[in-house]
Image (cartoon, rainbow, N blue to C red):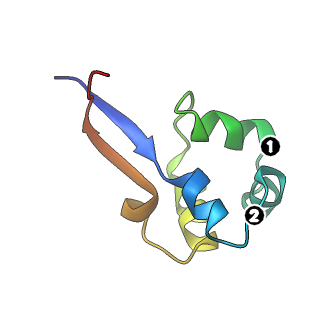
Amino acid sequence: MPKVLTNNVRALRFHHNEMTQQELAKMVSVSRQTIVAIEKGKYSPSLEVAFKIADVFSVSIAEVFSYQEQVDE
């Protein structure tokens, strides 16, 4: 089975005082559209951006992103 990159960015934002996409984007120096694309799984961030996102939420990259087998829905 092919593997896909999944993420918990939306949930982390929600649990971090309902942070907006714009606020997160500013903190990691990307556009809001980039955050939207990452959350939807349409864009895989650079390793640097992935680390910055994890740092904002004070968690490991593995708590933000995972690379796992695709589950057919």
Q: Position of residue 52 (x, y in %)?
A: 61, 63
Residue 5 image label: none
Q: Is residue 72 left or right of residue 5?
A: left
Q: Kindly identify the residue that appears in the image at 23 percent across and 23 percent down.
A: 2
User: Residue tagged by mark 1?
Assistant: 32
Q: Is residue 72 left or right of residue 40?
A: left
Q: Kindly identify the residue that appears in the image at 82 percent across and 60 percent down.
A: 23
User: Residue tagged by mark 2?
Assistant: 19
Q: Name the residue type under label 1.
A: Arg
Q: Is residue 7 above or below residue 59?
A: above
Crowding at dot 2, Cα within 10 Å, few <14 / some 14-19 / many 20+, comes out as some
Q: Kindly identify the residue that appears in the image at 41 percent across and 41 percent down.
A: 6
Q: Is residue 57 above or below residue 33?
A: below
Q: Quadrant of the C terminus?
A: top left
SS category of the residue bearing label 2: loop
Q: Kindly identify the residue that appears in the image at 46 percent across and 48 percent down.
A: 7
Find residue 62 and report its image quarter: bottom left
Q: Name the residue type under label 2.
A: Met
Q: Earlier in the sequence, mark 2 or mark 1?
A: 2
Q: Position of residue 49 (x, y in %)?
A: 60, 53
